Every structure is written in C-alpha cells, then in structure tokens.
Image (spheres, helix red, strand yellow):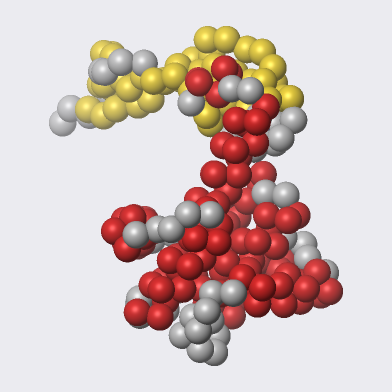
Amino acid sequence: MIFIGTVNLVRTRDEGNFLCPACGVSQGYRLRARRPWLTLYFIPTLPMGSFDYFVQCDHCKVNWDPSVLEMDAVTHANVGEEQFCDEALRAAVLVVLADEQFTENEIMALQKIAQQLMKRSMERDELGRICSSAQHNRIEAGNYVLSVSRHWNQQQRAQALQAMFLAATADGPLGEPQMRILTRMRELFEFTDTEYHAAIEQAVDWDLGA
Ligand SMILES: [Zn+2]
C-alpha cells in the first residue's frame, strides 16, 4: 500500500512591526508563505498549487491578508471592528442553533441583531448563508467564542454577550442549553456579577422591537 497525502509547508518570508487590527497596537509580525505539498510515505515530495501569503501577528496569532501592512490607522480600526461584528453575529447564530432549530422569531431577531452590530440591514439571504455555514461547521457556541474572543475588548465582550442573550431569548424564556452558554460566557469574559447583569440589562437598549 502506498501512503499518499498532502501537507501545508509554511515558511517565514519577512518580519517587522505592524499595527495589528485585533490587538489595536503595534506588534511584531511575520509574513508567512504557505504551500500545499504532495506527500509520499509522509515525506513532502511535490509542491502543488501556488504560495498563499499571510501576515501573522506575533502577539495574538491572528492571520491577516498581506494588504494589512499597507493600511492606515483608521482602516485598521474599521477592519478590527468589522471582524468583531462578524464574530459576534456568528456567536448569536450559534446560540440559536443550540436547540437545533430556527424559528421565524429567531430569524427576525438575528436580522435585527445584525443591523445593530453592523449598522446596516442584512437580507435574509445573507443571514441564511451565515446560518448554514454555522450549521455545517457544528462548532459549539462557547467553544467558538473561546477561539475568537481573545482580541475583543471589554466593551465588545459586553456587546457580544448582549447579542447572544437577545438571540437566546427571541423565542421567550431561555432554554437549558442556551442558559448554559450564557453562564459560560460570564466565566470566559471574567465578568463580575455586577458587570454581567449590567451588560444583560443594557441588552434592552438594543430596541429590537416586539
Ligand atoms: Zn495582534
């Protein structure tokens, strides 16, 4: 039997400092080049496809498109905020998915949450794509937030918690799995009781309408 497979080989091509949109401050980076190789008996023998370049922050380890090196400070802040909004919405979608179903109320609530976060309206199509990709990836909401929230600041954490809370309560009282997720967020974000309750109370200000 012949063992054939693929492996991604990654090399550092350059190093320097850049303004990391996730960290919000200047950090060291490495410009990395990734290329898939065909392996024979686990030994890379043949390159397949072209190089794929990305910039990795030394501090938060988030990967960015190399164009990040040419951005100015304002664009950086926007990119970081856009990424956060996307992540917070996905977290809210996963909270809804925790009970394995979407109801009309939940879809409408998610649309309004998206609007609040992104300051623009979101069509059902676009939301539907996010939902089906979340469903497809089958990641649990708590684990997802654990993996993406490293670069969220305190205010963004509160905002994400509010989005998740509003998504969880779109259909009335909180179910058991959703309650568990929100409790886990409290621990993950290291909120005190007061901070946690203040954040939840502010969710009312989102004015999602009835
Ligand atoms: Zn960073």
Q: Quadrant of residue 196?
A: bottom right
Residue found at x 32% / y 63%? 124
Q: Position of residue 40 (x, y in %)?
A: 25, 21
Q: 7 and 121: which one is in front?
A: 121
Residue found at x 46% / y 73%? 109
Residue at the extreme bottom of the image, as rendered = 173
Measured along the vertical axis of the image, is residue 105 above or below residue 40? below
Q: 49 and 71: which one is in front?
A: 71
Count every numbered label the image shows and give the total: 0
Question: With 7 as the anchor, is 59 left or right in this view?
Answer: right
Question: With 141 as the anchor, is 202 left or right in this view?
Answer: right
Residue found at x 64% / y 66%? 161
Q: Position of residue 141 (x, y in %)?
A: 51, 64
Q: 109 and 2: which one is in front?
A: 109
Question: With 181 as the anchor, is 26 left or right in this view?
Answer: right
Q: Position of residue 191 (x, y in %)?
A: 78, 65
Visible residue check, residue 44? no
Q: Quadrant of the N terminus?
A: top left
Residue found at x 65% / y 36%? 77
Visible residue check, residue 5? yes
Residue at the extreme left of the image, as rendered = 1
Measured along the vertical axis of the image, is residue 164 above or below residue 36? below
Question: With 73 as the anchor, is 9 left or right in this view?
Answer: left
Q: Position of residue 94 (x, y in %)?
A: 46, 65
Q: Quadrant of residue 154?
A: bottom right
